[in-house]
Amino acid sequence: MTKNTPKLSLRVPEPPARPGDKADFSHVQIDEAGAVARPDVSVSPEVTRDLAFRLVRVLDDNGKAVGPWDPKLDVETLKRGLKAMVLTRAFDDRMHKAHRQGKTSFYMKCTGEEAIAVAQALVLSPEDMGFPTYRQQGLLIARGYPLATMMNQIYSNAADPIKGRQLPIMYSAKDYGFFTISGNLGTQVPQAVGWAMASAYKGDDKIASAWIGDGATAEGDFHSALTFAAVYRAPVILNIVNNQWAISSFQGIAGGIETTFASKAIGYGLPCLRVDGNDFLAVWAATQWAAERARTNQGATVIEFLTYRHAPHSTSDDPSRYRPGDEGAHWPLGDPVERLKQHLIGQKTWSEDDQKAAEADAEAQVKAAAKESEAIGTLGQSRPSVKTMFEEVFASEDWRLVEQRREVGV
Amino acid sequence: MTKNTPKLSLRVPEPPARPGDKADFSHVQIDEAGAVARPDVSVSPEVTRDLAFRLVRVLDDNGKAVGPWDPKLDVETLKRGLKAMVLTRAFDDRMHKAHRQGKTSFYMKCTGEEAIAVAQALVLSPEDMGFPTYRQQGLLIARGYPLATMMNQIYSNAADPIKGRQLPIMYSAKDYGFFTISGNLGTQVPQAVGWAMASAYKGDDKIASAWIGDGATAEGDFHSALTFAAVYRAPVILNIVNNQWAISSFQGIAGGIETTFASKAIGYGLPCLRVDGNDFLAVWAATQWAAERARTNQGATVIEFLTYRHAPHSTSDDPSRYRPGDEGAHWPLGDPVERLKQHLIGQKTWSEDDQKAAEADAEAQVKAAAKESEAIGTLGQSRPSVKTMFEEVFASEDWRLVEQRREVGV
Amino acid sequence: MADTTSMNMIQALNSALDIKMAEDRNVLSFGEDAGYFGGVFRVTDHLQKKHGLTRSFDAPISENGIAAAGIGMAVYGLRPVIEMQFADYIYPAYDQLVSEAAKIRYRSGGEFTCPITVRSPYGGGIFGGQTHSQSPESLFTHISGLKTVIPSNPYDAKGLLIAAIEDDDPVVFFEPKRLYNGPFDGWHERPVSPWKAQELAQVPTGKYTVPLGKARIMREGSDVTILAYGTMVWVSLAAAEHAGVDAEVIDLRSLVPLDIEAIEESVKKTGRCVVVHEAPKTSGYGAELSSLVQERCFYHLEAPVARVAGWDTPYPHAFEWEYFPGPERVAEAIKRTMEG
Amino acid sequence: MADTTSMNMIQALNSALDIKMAEDRNVLSFGEDAGYFGGVFRVTDHLQKKHGLTRSFDAPISENGIAAAGIGMAVYGLRPVIEMQFADYIYPAYDQLVSEAAKIRYRSGGEFTCPITVRSPYGGGIFGGQTHSQSPESLFTHISGLKTVIPSNPYDAKGLLIAAIEDDDPVVFFEPKRLYNGPFDGWHERPVSPWKAQELAQVPTGKYTVPLGKARIMREGSDVTILAYGTMVWVSLAAAEHAGVDAEVIDLRSLVPLDIEAIEESVKKTGRCVVVHEAPKTSGYGAELSSLVQERCFYHLEAPVARVAGWDTPYPHAFEWEYFPGPERVAEAIKRTMEG
Ligand SMILES: Cc1ncc(C[n+]2csc(CCOP(=O)(O)OP(=O)(O)O)c2C)c(N)n1
Ligand SMILES: Cc1ncc(C[n+]2csc(CCOP(=O)(O)OP(=O)(O)O)c2C)c(N)n1
Ligand SMILES: [Mg+2]
Ligand SMILES: [Mg+2]
């Protein structure tokens, strides 16, 4: 028997930089925009294996759209996307502030990750079903869901469509293709697969799309999702949002040092793409590619979106305790809003003034919505009737709930 | 939006042949013996990616050991392995019969899969810890665990070391590097990773080895195991025994049509090997390669062993209901006992007579053990004292157990 | 009266599935070995052949994935019936069932619903050892938003399963596997009688439902009320006879929702109560039943509510009959309660 | 008497870990965000810095994997302390804990053991909504082979955690997060007092243990016995005062093993009993307590044992104080019980 010299030792991965250290993204390997080939939508999954280790990018450093993945969008669509991202950011900023003002108990921003949800919202149809995490508010905003209604949920006020039952930001919006958010990480991904299986089973034409964070890919649900998606060839897009952090844990704690998250697809025989998540056009193109596969009975695609969580994890978090304060500034893939803006400016269909106007408009929209929602009330000032606490546990109350409701006197 | 023509449809995979059909293994791609290169033990995991789609084999069709994976074992070791496989088979046959004779409630054979457990038992040390499924009885037998003690467990008799508490074949044998078998599939694999992490944490030199079936790889525990093994670089061997079936479900239901089980390793950045599981020498060589990586702080290796479950799943099963009766006869990788025997005969260090003698000896050993064990008693004739039912729930009984034991009057 | 035929519990359950699948394309069934093979207990036998590959199929060995896929389907609008091969293996699906299925209606303000049925063989008495004998029902009764149903005979099995499938909420449906092939009263040394001989095995061939939340009085009596479900219903009947006591034996059939009226009425009549189940005693569903009875019938009780249950140990292979709460143990509790 | 210092519950738990890690190389701690960052509630703060990277580290977001790895380590001979970030997220680990940790000693005939400690913040009162407020303790008390411990104050928290780590069996250790920073008696509109003001926050800096299975009488009284644990201990004390009743308030501290003697003695003295917990009522641990009390003290009881618990609904964000069993609800139950 070979006995070991030196003795065994336990490896615990550490991020390249902690508070006080210089931010370091030298490990992030980035392809040139346009450098990665676009396989035909009908290729067999193994053809995409190499793409797990590349990075699909369309917008180059000058904001030009290059290469085979350029979705060649018309200007109106580009502007729509840009405005939705700007609006999402404005919404986040205001709600984050609302928390500080004591108007709500909790909030979570998606700053720097707006392109992912917004582009997908526009590629997919509201009849498809999205199974989001808590960082895809862009889906709702891009589809024109009323901002005031989102705020009503955040404030748990009397007009909250989910009746004050959920933590802020756990929206539910069926008509907008937005599945009720779960506080439990990962659980929604295999559900999306089941939903997609149901659509296929019925011979319908709706597809599903699910999102999961880099950290949450470690959950068993993720494995179930990929297994079922592959075995039953479910029409679903499985999006991994790799924003480098899971609260205070860097992506290496989820296995991100050893390989890419996209490469998880390989072991299930699923096709995969690894995409610059801060590149609106790349997100669009990848989503379109995956959606077309799904719609043509070729099954699921795994997409890893590389991005960076600029904001704190939530209003309960202070990232300066575990990562360099300026780390975000060193993130090599830039800012999705800025990049799409530069693209439009480069096309001469947009200007800095247009941008300012869009920002002002977004702020105005958010402000108006806040006014509307806050007129109803913020957390604790207004809320749904207490008796709703006992409703919808089941389709109809059982005797226990009736008795308990009476005990509360409602 | 692209809408789909034709409509979506649900794909449910089916095996190539059902009862009444001709057995079909044309999908099994088999490399020539010796054809697959053996990377250095210190290569980085990505170097082994291609090996996920190859098949490491040493014994060729004529029983000659060829190629870079030949472990070049001495004759004594080869004979020891052959005899242990023969003994395992004889044990299985007798216990299967014992079930039919009503001597026990249950039994599970490993016919055709003997090489996997037996070779590993000899490569690893009893101080390493094996986390087996119910089809690695060869581990115990190859290490000389008393056959009569195994039978005592199977009969739940008064000498059963685990006191009649577990279903037959759920052995526990710490001193033989054999972890208590769980009836729950998959759970033991991430435990093996934790055990290996503990060894590394302590700076010891023991490694762990875990087994899981093709079917059970779909459990979330398998995903946890690979994630933790990769992140903490745990000194563990993760063996997947792909015997083509999981009770009545063919391996395609676990994703085996889409890709190989070995390829699961890629998405975690773990090295992998895919090995002819009916080739004693290939099993040995692959285990050795993985063990050496583990012992030298290079972490875990995933090995898929390709084999075939010749026997029914268990004594409760009748495979003729779901697969062609003669399917096993068409299995292209032959029989592990026969193949090692031919190798020895080819070396002129063994003969058909030696084989017959070994078989006779094995039967005699099993018979003697049965005599010893059955003298104590078979199921229902003899059993541990009833009061042991209440013991070892905790290190010491709590008042509930004391009261309940008194209620039974023991 | 509709056509009836004699069925064992497996056939009755199979008939329920067959009828619902024939009548409603939204009903489908899947689980480990549940497709071509028809399930290790044959409950889904022939469904694939009859209704097609995509309507009754095998699933990967991932109880978590089976539950999650079923939940996704139910959210879509289907009425999936999933099989957990043994209740002992339901735990990997526990999170999906308690954190998701149970809460989807509530947390979405009624926007999404989850009409899934989770079938699973449970219980002991079959020498299955600790991983093929468990009774985890109380773990589901604690979860707001889940219904838990357990039949004790073929007639109810079919009617309850159809009701469960038609129910708009998630239902966990435990099937007492010791009763699959015949009633079993715990006298394990006597030959098992087939279902044929029992009235409750005369099952209509067509569709009917047994409503969730209604108990069945299996035996009227005036001395003591026995609350039981699953296999323990038969054991309780045998125990009453063995004790020679005029017991009222109530088969709860559905644990959540619970038929509290039937329970109260009976206990107020008899003034005594024994609760029986196979699961370990501590925090078993018997605890809830015992608490409810003493909360609601305290001033009618002549003796403490007794619990007869599995011991607080794992289920031990060699001690099947010392562990299993048989008629002698139940009879003793009845007698103790009569003396109290 | 040893040196003491004023600690809140977080500091007390941290001190327990620190002491055990310093004294025993076999003790290590890991969980989501539990390493460098020290845990989202800071219970493992500074442990990595002080004891080294491999002794207090971050884990992948896989409660299943954390439990399984911990079990493997415990089998090896270590005494791992794993953190489940919120009790609401413990379900993915449920199978590993109930099917494995709980049964390893028994099923191996004592050959293998599993001395793991599973820490998890639990309970409501923090506007955490349905996924940051749950109290799943009863689900663990039903499992033979698991111990379940819940402290209510810094002194006990430290002593019980050390005892749990030293225990040779798996212990699920729920920490009432509403008590982390100060005692909380349910009068949520009054300012939260810090622990400093409480005697039970004067904590020895050195090592001591509080034995598992021994209740603490928090208030002696003669009229009614209140059984509680965690945050509800403080609520019960406030409720007794509010009701103006001379209640005996017992802090169970450990649910399994349970101090049945203390309970019996008290109820036999008072003749009345109220059981209080935050978890939903149906099949909560209160059911077990109520059943035990009426089984053992029936002839001493003057009134039915009352349960005050969370409602049988998910935990709703906007209705925190209607859901949370506060002192008024408990007081009402006390009064009802006094009248009975
Ligand atoms: C099952 C479960 N475990 C733990 C948590 C607590 N938690 C909430 S968010 C989070 C980090 C998630 O990180 P990631 O998946 O990378 O998503 P991101 O926040 O970066 O978008 C954790 C651990 C949870 N919500 N659910
Ligand atoms: C968690 C769990 N689910 C289901 C089962 C029931 N079961 C026992 S063996 C088996 C098939 C396992 O197949 P595989 O993993 O391929 O191993 P093999 O029997 O082929 O060696 C199943 C489904 C179980 N024991 N545990
Ligand atoms: Mg992240
Ligand atoms: Mg198999």
Image (tube, coloured by chain):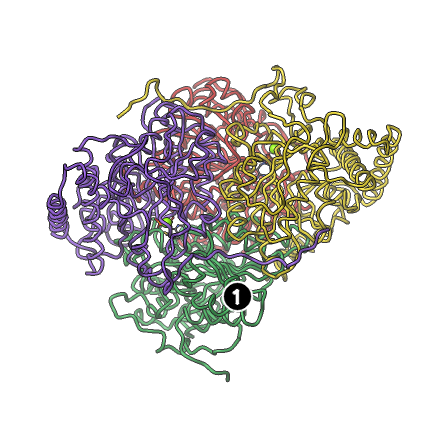
Chain colours: A purple, B yellow, C red, D green
Residue at 40% from the left image edge and 32% from the top image edge: A301
Q: In this view, does B7 lie above or below D217?
A: above
Q: Is residue A88 above or below residue B105?
A: below
Q: Is residue C255 something one can see in this rendering? A: yes
Q: Callout 1: residue from which chain?
A: D
Q: In the image, residue B310 lies at what x, y percent?
A: 68, 28
Relative placement, left or right, of B3 versus B375 is left
Decide which of C172, C191 is in the foreground and name it: C172
Residue A249, image quadrant: bottom left
**Under tag 1, what secondary structure?**
loop
Q: In the image, residue A178 lies at what x, y percent?
A: 28, 38
Residue B82, image quadrant: top right
Decide which of C281, B82 is in the foreground and name it: B82
Q: Is residue B20 above or below residue A10?
A: above
Q: In the image, residue D124 lies at what x, y percent?
A: 35, 58
Instruction: From the image, tell me which residue sits under label 1.
Output: D259
Residue at 56% from the left image edge and 22% from the top image edge: B15
**Amino acid at the residue labelled 1:** Asp
Relative placement, left or right, of C228 versus B345 is left
**Label total for image:** 1
Q: Is residue C216 something one can see in this rendering? A: no
Q: Which residue is the extreme one toward the bottom?
A: D1
Residue A392, image quadrant: top left
Residue at 52% from the left image edge and 50% from the top image edge: B228
Relative placement, left or right, of D71 versus C96 is right
